[in-house]
Structures are given as C-alpha cells and as structure tokens.
C-alpha cells in the first residue's frame, strides 16, 4: 500500500513538473532557445541556449516568477558557454581596474563565474549594466563576491571549499530541489518540541513538526560547564551540554532541514555532530552566518584538543556541513519543504543574525522565532525587525527578561567604559576586556576607535591589543558591509574601516609585549572566561590592584566570569603547564551594562509592543527560569495573548 502511495505521489510530482516546464517554456520567447528546467535547492533554474534575449528584457523573468510564485534563475546551457580563458579577458575589459578584482573562478556545474573584488559595486555597474554585459557577451552567469578589506583565512577557505565541491553541491541541491517541489500536502496539525535553551541559556534547539515535515530551528551546545562539557567523552555533563535530540522520537535522517538564526556556539555548535552521524539534508543560514560558523566551529575543535579533550566532531564533519549549507539574505522568501516557507529578517544581535519567519501550509500558521535579538541602539547594526506578513506564534529570547534587567543609556555606558579605562591607564594599569570574538569585540572596537588615539578628546592614547579570533571575525565583517549600519557600511566601502584603526595592535605570538609594555587595553576571547586567551591574561593581571577587568556581556550562571563578577576573591586557574593554581583577585572588577547584543527588559517589551501584526500566542526561551516565566506573564498581559514559558522536552500543539 505504501509503495503504491509513493508511486502515486511520484507520478503527481512528475506531471506537475512537466506542467511547470511547459508553462515556463510557453512564456519565454522562442528565440531564447529553451532547453530544460532544474530544481536546485529552493530555486528553479531555466537553461537556455540564447539567454541574451532574456537579459535584454528583464520583465520576461519577472512575469514568469510572478506567475509561478517561485524564484527563477536563468542560466546558459553548457553548449552556449564561452571558453573560460576568453571569458576572463572580456570580464577584465568590461570591469574597470578600480574594482580591484582579486579572483575570477568559473563553475561549469552551475554555468556561473564568480568575480571577487574589493569594490563589487564597480563590477555590478550602474543599474547592473556591467554584470549584464558580462552575461550577454560570455553567456556565463556572473556572481559577485566582496574581497574583505582585511585578510581572512576563513573566507578564503570557505569560498575555495565551495568551488572545490561544486559538482557535489550541484547533485545535492538537485536532490533537495526535487524533495522541496513535491505536491503540497495539507497538514492537519502543527507542533513544536523544546529540545534545548528553554528556561536556560545554551544548547538552543526547537523541533517543528507537521505530518509531512520535520525542521530544527537552531542546534547548539551549552557554554557550561566549560570545555569539559563540550567533549565527546563528557559523561554525565552531556545531559546539560547538548540538545535532547534522542528524546524527540525521530531519527536524524527524518529531518527535512536545519534553520540557523546565527553563528554563536549555543545556537549552531551541535550541527556538525548531526552530519557526523548521518544527516544529509540542508542547513539554512545567511552568508555571514556560514562564514562565522566555519571560524567558531574550527576554533572549538582546536580548543578542546589543546585542553586534552576529544571534540564532538572534527574538521571533516565541519566541511561536510558547509557543503550542505544553503545561504539566504534578509527578505528572501524560500521554500524549504513543500509546505514551509522561510524568510530571514534582521535580528540586530551579531553579523548575519536573523529572526526566522516561517509560513506553514497555505496560510495555515505563521511563526516568528527571534533567536538572539537586539531591539536597541548599537554601533554595528540596526534594531531587530518588527514588521512581518503574519504572526500566529512568537518565540522570543529572554536573556535579560527579568524585572531588574534594565541596562543604562548607551551614551552613559560608553562614558562609564571610557572613564574606567582612563582611570586605570592613568594609574599605570592595564584594562582587560573579555569579549566574545564575534559581536561584542567588534562593538567595543568601534567604541574605542571613536574615543581613543592620538586625537582622543579624553586624552587616552594607549595601544589596544587584540587576541584570539577577534581579528578574523572583524575581517569577516568587512566582507559583508551590507549587513551593518549604513554609516559603518559607508566607512568600510570608503576604505576607512574602524577595525583597521592605528590604535589596534595584534598579538599573534607571545603575550609579553601586551603584559610588559605599560598601560594598555587588552580585548581577548572568551567573554565568560571559560577558556581562550582571556583566562591567561586574567591569571597574569588579577593580583595587581592597578589593573581592571571590565565585563561588557552576559556571563552564564556557572561560568568563571559569573563567579568573578559576583566578587570571588580567589580562583583556581591553569598555569603554563595546565596545572591549577590559586590566584588572588585584587584587580578592579567592573561590569558595564549597555553593550550586550541582547535586548534588556524594556527593549524586549518594546519589541513586542511594536510587532506588526501582534502575535496570538507567545513563548519565552533562552533565559534563566525565573526570567522566562516573568517575561511570559508580563508580555501576555500587555498584548492579551496566550503566553507560556515552556520547559525543555515540552511539546506544544500550535494548530
């Protein structure tokens, strides 16, 4: 019976695809030389022998896409492609030298040519005329990549991997495309299961299910209890470190897709583990999220090995995950199954961070999942988006959702930060700022670049040392200025990136220069003192009362950072040989709120009040238990919605 049902669905799909192909062919000019269509991931690719006809009239494709309600991409049939060497000459002649092309690579599997340049706008040309000229003269579909203004091994590696695995990705995307473009099945119910990150911070993961689809939103690991809890042999600690995937009554291969909100490890750190144990499906993310994940995941494996542990996965699993990623920009509506449409919106948290809008069925239900979000002023990003087509249920983070989680005015926070730095350096001390490599470090860099240096209005002209992944993360920011605030984007496009200011000095080897060369500011990862360079700097600076440590972000309850923040007078820290030694905490310990990438209580409430449309149901997540519960009650009263604070392993039927 099941076999007959499967055959029947396959026949329906085949007939539907033939009808779609016929409809597209009939709407195209005959001289375009229609060859065939292919489903490639969420997109429909139309192959033509003479695509010049279409490039001359953009309205043809727009009309077809509007008619079939799907994204349409035009490519040349392989027989029509110009020889790559000749095509490269034409590209170099058409693109002005000022664009500073750094690489041109051809991908025959996709009939595409990738042009990497420092100034992509000059490759695109006014109203896209240069790109159109390249396509018309060479028949290759041009794709433009931005060269980061700072060297980035991560971006180089990820882009090279995509080229090297072009043939595999073509097969993978074709397979996914066929699965997505099945006949739409009407679902009778929709439910979600909390697999991690509910009434806690860490290991975020939410399973969304219908009778026909299973999708994970985020799949992270816990920042606690430190590196030990992130090892493959973590023992009982694993119960707190990873999502409850084994309790959700499904196998990894049943998943249709993984949707990621952003690159932080508590949201994305468990994804390569899925591939290690057999997952072969797509992972959706924004382009910056993909690149930042490559950076953070590889760093995690190295850190665990250096600590004498065994990581959950290795570089091979991370590469496999990257080849299965499908990137989407903000605002792109994307079919991820036959009944689910995904749209990313700005979350304002870190580079590429997104709120997730999911449209289920033909108007059956709509979900907004905030991931981590910031609805307030930062120097890096615009506030989180509040306008959506429809919202039936909202899943909202609650990191700072407690009644007392009110951060100071941002101007006051910057003034306090600079005053602490000024007092410390004037007393001959050093300032240590432990910060997450991605997000807080760049925010603090932009702030310090504004207040310090030879022309500082505060008279602070000391070096700012950077260590850890901060430099690499900042380089990735320069490759995606369109995701940044307009003012910052314009600075990067004008070769005035604040991340390359003369006040910053990079530590690539010994730390002695930063420690011995007089007053200075040191920004080092990790932000919670759970490992990385910040712990060693803290050990070596903690006993001198002239020094200061400034926390500018969240510390989880059991982290070393929280203990120090709460006033620990002595802590045990590893020395150069890895042996734990007692260290007196005599340095000044300060917390300057206002720099977090998370919304505080007032911002969370303002976000919900300004949401359009208002949600009918609300669920809190990503926060300590009391904060989740209190925020759910408060927001429920404000917007008169059904509100809850689910626990891990709770299953809720939404429809």
Image (cartoon, rainbow, N blue to C red):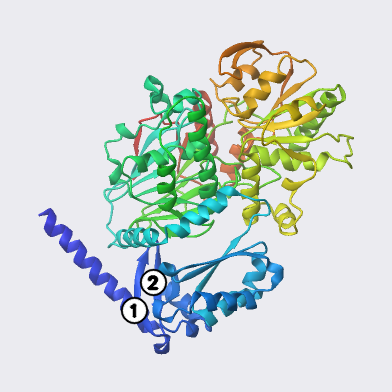
Position in image of residue 167 (x %, y %):
38, 62
- Residue drawn 50% across the image and 36% down it: 265
* Quarter of the image where one finds residue 93: bottom right
**Is residue 388 rendered to the left or right of residue 506?**
left
Q: Residues within 10 Å of mark 1 (few under 14, many from 20)?
A: some
Quarter the N terminus occupies:
bottom left
Label 2 sits on residue: 68
Outermost residue to the left: 1
- Foreground residue, 524 or 484? 524
* Quarter of the image where one finds residue 40: bottom left
Q: Is residue 641 visible?
A: no
Q: Residues within 10 Å of mark 2 (few under 14, many from 20)?
A: few
In terms of sequence position, does the residue under pointer 1 or pointer 2 come before the other?
1
Position in image of residue 572 (x %, y %):
59, 13
- Foreground residue, 505 or 510? 510
Q: Is residue 3 visible?
A: yes
Measured Cα–Cα span from mark 1 to mark 2: 9 Å
Vertical placement of 317 versus 333: above or below?
Answer: above
Label 1 sits on residue: 23
**Is residue 498 rendered to the left or right of residue 307?**
right
- Residue drawn 32% across the image and 74% down it: 20
Q: Disc 1, disc 2: CB below 8 Å?
A: yes
């Amino acid at each position: 019976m099941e076999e007959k049902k499967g055959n029947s669905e396959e026949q329906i799909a085949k007939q539907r695809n033939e009808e779609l192909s016929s409809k597209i062919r009939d709407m195209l000019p005959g001289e375009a030389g229609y060859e065939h269509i292919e489903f490639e991931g969420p997109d429909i690719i139309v192959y033509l022998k003479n695509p010049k006809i279409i490039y001359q009239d953009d309205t043809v494709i727009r009309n077809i896409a509007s008619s079939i309600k799907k994204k349409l991409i035009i490519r040349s049939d392989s027989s029509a492609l110009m020889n790559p060497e000749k095509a490269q000459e034409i590209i170099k002649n058409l693109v002005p030298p000022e664009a500073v092309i750094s690489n041109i690579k051809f991908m025959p599997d996709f009939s595409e040519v990738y042009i990497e340049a420092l100034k992509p706008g000059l490759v695109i040309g006014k109203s896209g005329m240069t790109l159109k000229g390249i396509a018309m003269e060479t028949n290759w579909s041009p794709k433009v990549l931005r060269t980061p203004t700072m060297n980035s091994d991560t971006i180089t590696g990820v882009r090279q991997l995509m080229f090297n695995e072009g043939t595999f990705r073509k097969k993978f995307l074709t397979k996914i495309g066929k699965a997505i473009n099945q006949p739409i099945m009407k679902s009778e119910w929709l439910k979600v299961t909390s697999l991690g990150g509910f009434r806690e911070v860490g290991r975020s993961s939410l399973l969304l299910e219908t009778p026909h689809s299973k999708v994970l939103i985020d799949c992270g690991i816990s920042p606690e209890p430190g590196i030990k809890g992130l090892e493959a042999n973590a023992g009982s600690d694993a119960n707190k470190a990873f999502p409850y995937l084994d309790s959700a009554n499904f196998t990894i291969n049943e998943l249709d897709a993984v949707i990621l909100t952003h690159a932080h490890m508590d949201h994305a750190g468990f994804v390569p583990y899925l591939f290690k144990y057999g997952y072969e499906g797509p992972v959706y993310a924004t382009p910056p999220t993909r690149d930042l994940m490559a950076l953070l995941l590889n760093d995690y494996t190295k850190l665990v090995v250096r600590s004498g542990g065994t990581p959950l996965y290795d570089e091979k699993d991370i590469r496999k995950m990257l080849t299965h990623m499908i990137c989407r920009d903000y605002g792109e509506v994307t079919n991820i199954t036959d009944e689910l449409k995904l749209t990313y919106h700005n979350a304002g948290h870190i580079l590429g961070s997104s709120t997730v809008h999911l449209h289920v069925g033909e108007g059956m239900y709509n979900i907004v999942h905030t991931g981590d979000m910031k609805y307030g002023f930062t120097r890096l990003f615009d506030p989180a988006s509040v306008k959506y087509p429809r919202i039936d249920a909202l899943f909202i983070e609650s990191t700072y959702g407690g009644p007392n989680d009110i951060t100071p005015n941002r101007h006051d926070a910057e003034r306090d930060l600079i005053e602490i730095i000024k007092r410390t350096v004037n007393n001959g001390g050093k300032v240590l700022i432990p910060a997450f490599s991605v997000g807080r470090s760049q925010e603090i860099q932009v702030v310090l670049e504004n207040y310090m240096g030879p022309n500082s209005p505060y008279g602070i002209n000391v070096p700012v040392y950077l260590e850890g992944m901060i430099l690499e993360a900042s380089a990735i920011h320069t490759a995606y200025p369109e995701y940044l605030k307009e003012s910052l984007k314009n600075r990067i496009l004008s070769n005035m990136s604040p991340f390359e200011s003369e006040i910053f000095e990079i530590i690539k080897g010994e730390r002695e220069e930063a420690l011995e060369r007089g007053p200075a500011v040191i920004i080092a990862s990790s932000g919670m003192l759970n490992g990385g360079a910040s712990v060693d700097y803290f050990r070596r600076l903690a006993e001198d009362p002239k020094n200061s440590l400034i926390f500018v972000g969240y510390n989880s309850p059991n982290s070393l950072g929280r203990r120090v923040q709460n006033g620990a007078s002595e802590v045990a820290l590893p020395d150069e040989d890895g042996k734990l030694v007692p260290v007196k905490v005599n340095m000044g310990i300060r917390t300057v709120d206002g720099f977090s990438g998370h919304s505080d209580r007032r911002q969370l409430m303002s976000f919900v009040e300004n949401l359009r449309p208002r949600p009918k149901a609300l669920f809190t997540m990503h926060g300590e238990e009391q904060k989740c519960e209190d925020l759910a009650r408060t927001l429920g009263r404000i917007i008169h919605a059904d509100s809850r604070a689910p626990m891990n392993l709770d299953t809720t039927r939404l429809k």
